[in-house]
Amino acid sequence: MSTTIWGIHTQDDHLFLNKNVMAIGWREFGDLSAIEPTREAFKKHYEDTYPGAKKGSIATSAGMLFRFAHEVQIGDYVVFPSKSNREINIGIIEGDYTYKPDSGEYVQQRPVKWLKHLPRTSFSQGALYEVGSALSFFVVKTYADEYMTALDKNFRKNAVISSDEEDETVAATAEDIIETTKDFILKELSKHLKGYDLEEFVADLLNAMGYRTTVSKHGGDSGIDITAYKDELPPRILVQVKSQDGDIRETTIQSLKGAMREGDYGLFVTLSNYTKNAQKYLENTPIIRGINGTELVDLILKYYEQLSEKYRKMIPLKMVYIPVAKGDSESL
């Protein structure tokens, strides 16, 4: 039977390290052993306990509580990154779930024997990224072998991984972070901007890119949502924006072409993508540029600081630097 390694986060390093436990919160949820041991029962209890919880968080949070109480086995391993000393702590789970109502917020506990406390520099960037999960409690999968290797008695505690060679996980980790950011942006756009709201946003993005824009009056635009100019002189750029979920068809782009006069250029913007026929039409019609959801996100990242404050609040991002493979240079 394969070894299961759990990852866990906490705001109370002292509790974990000095009391030899791993623990999660949700104090109001009560004693997990008093709830029927099914995922559905945990979800129902979560909804009753936290009636204001967002629908998407119910299954995730209830699932973590269920796994902590019923899926974790004695003999499983746990990895816990402590913030106070920036170490990676690896332990073995020694006992069953217990409810500790006098333990402040962290009332859901399991006894752990901590086996090793290692500097973060002992692990690859990919392994560190995996245990930096946004979840409070999760299964370590991709880099489980690396953490098990760290328990070997011959493992050098102060060895920096890949001391002579480049850490190959850096590039993959950077790509994961970038893709997660792009997914977040596209989801926020889809959630907050439909119809006319997306038109206003695209106009603001074009302004950030240095264009002068006019948004058409609602309902009377003859298929043209935005008119844009790079400066006071032609060419005129006619923009059509679609927030629909399905891919854009060729006939939809042809309607934009029909509204264009000689000398005009066209721009079609969608949060989704284009059908194969629509892509061929765009390739054969160079005066019309099509931008899909992925390309739109790339432009948002490039011109984010120039967007209106309204949209930067809607899509909150923080400029950070991330490690990349040598020879590359990219930041978010």
Image: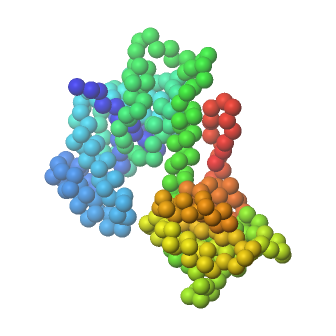
Which residue is at 58% across, 81% downward?
223
Q: How far across and how far down the image is residue 80, in percent? A: 43, 34
| Quarter of image, res 144 | top left
The answer to whether residue 64 of the structure is visible from this angle is: yes
Relative to residue 175, is residue 45 drawn left or right? left
Which residue is at 50% across, 37% downward?
129
Specify the farthest residue to the right: 232
| Quarter of image, res 216 | bottom right
Specify the farthest residue to the bottom: 220
Which residue is at 63% across, 64% downward?
285
Which scheme is used to colour this image of the protein? Answer: rainbow
Vertical order, 318 against 275 (above or below): above
Q: Nearer the viewer, residue 5 or 49?
A: 5
Relative to residue 119, is residue 54 drawn left or right? left
Specify the farthest residue to the left: 36
Relative to residue 297, is residue 17 drawn left or right? left
Q: Nearer the viewer, residue 142 or 249?
A: 249
Q: Nearer the viewer, residue 246 or 108?
A: 246
